Image (spheres, rainbow, N blue to C red):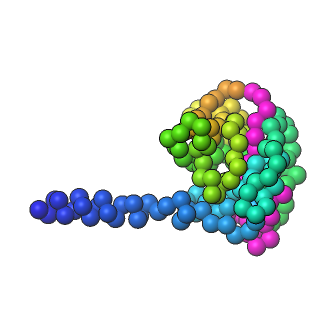
């Protein structure tokens, strides 16, 4: 009887402890989303898109690595030291949708995210720097050792950002 009670209690309490997507993300300013689980501030839209009225408008650009790095460097300032995300940070946004036609990311936090690969700055699992990527298509996927033109979504560490003054470029 005690074992059944403990199991039932764990089943009821565990989802509350893990939190929901709405608890994970909050929105301090237009175009920004704070990821409480990772202590990061993300741009809600991809490079080439503009955030207006809860949506990302425009076509997300695809750029090569040099252009992605230049964009991050140009966007960075004292209040918001924007950068390309690390592989594990970008991958942490993946949420299996169970639908191959959907996008594997929280659409309320990151609206109008396009299908396609995204640049990141760091290595994963022993691979050399800049060689692993995240695609939010369907259930999401990762791949390493590719080249091409990919999407960009910048991030800043929450403790390095002044969110009152931080704005999405």
In percent of width and height, residue 54 lies at 72, 61
> Considering only vertical position in the picture, is 118 above or below 25?
above
Q: Which quadrant is the N terminus positioned in?
A: bottom left
> Considering only vertical position in the picture, is 33 above or below 92?
below
Does the stretch in magenta take in 153? yes
- Depth order, front residue of 131/164: 164
For the record, the magenta segment spans 147-169
Farthest-out residue, left: 1
**Horizontal placement of 89 versus 97: left or right?**
right
**Which residue is painted at 30% across and 59% down in the image?**
11
- Main structural element of the magenta stretch: helix, strand or loop? loop
Residue 141 seen anywhere in this rendered image of the structure = yes
In percent of width and height, residue 58 lies at 82, 48
- Depth order, front residue of 145/141: 141
In percent of width and height, residue 40 lies at 65, 59
Task: Name the quadrant containing residue 61.
Answer: top right
**Which residue is painted at 82% across and 34% down in the image?**
64
Q: Which quadrant is the C terminus positioned in?
A: bottom right
Does the stretch in magenta take in 37? no
Task: Name the quadrant containing residue 9.
Answer: bottom left
In percent of width and height, residue 67 lies at 86, 39
**Horizontal placement of 36 versus 163: left or right?**
left
Count of residue discs? 0
**Which residue is painted at 64% across and 29% down in the image?**
144
Residue 127 seen anywhere in this rendered image of the structure = no
> Considering only vertical position in the picture, is 114 above or below 167?
above
Task: Name the quadrant containing residue 39.
Answer: bottom right
């Amino acid at each position: 009887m005690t074992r059944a009670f403990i199991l039932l209690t764990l089943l009821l309490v565990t989802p509350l402890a893990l939190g929901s997507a709405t608890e994970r993300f909050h929105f301090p300013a237009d175009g920004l989303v704070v990821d409480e689980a990772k202590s990061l501030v993300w741009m809600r839209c991809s490079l080439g898109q503009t955030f207006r009225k809860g949506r990302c408008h425009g076509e997300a650009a695809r750029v090569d690595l040099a252009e992605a790095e230049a964009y991050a460097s140009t966007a960075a300032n004292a209040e918001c030291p924007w950068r390309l995300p690390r592989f594990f940070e970008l991958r942490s946004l993946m949420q299996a949708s169970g639908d191959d036609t959907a996008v594997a990311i929280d659409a309320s936090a990151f609206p109008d995210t396009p299908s396609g690969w995204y640049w990141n700055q760091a290595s994963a699992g022993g691979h050399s720097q800049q060689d692993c990527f995240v695609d939010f298509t369907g259930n999401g996927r990762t791949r390493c050792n590719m080249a091409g033109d990919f999407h960009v979504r910048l991030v800043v560490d929450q403790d390095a950002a002044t969110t009152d003054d931080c704005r999405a470029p």
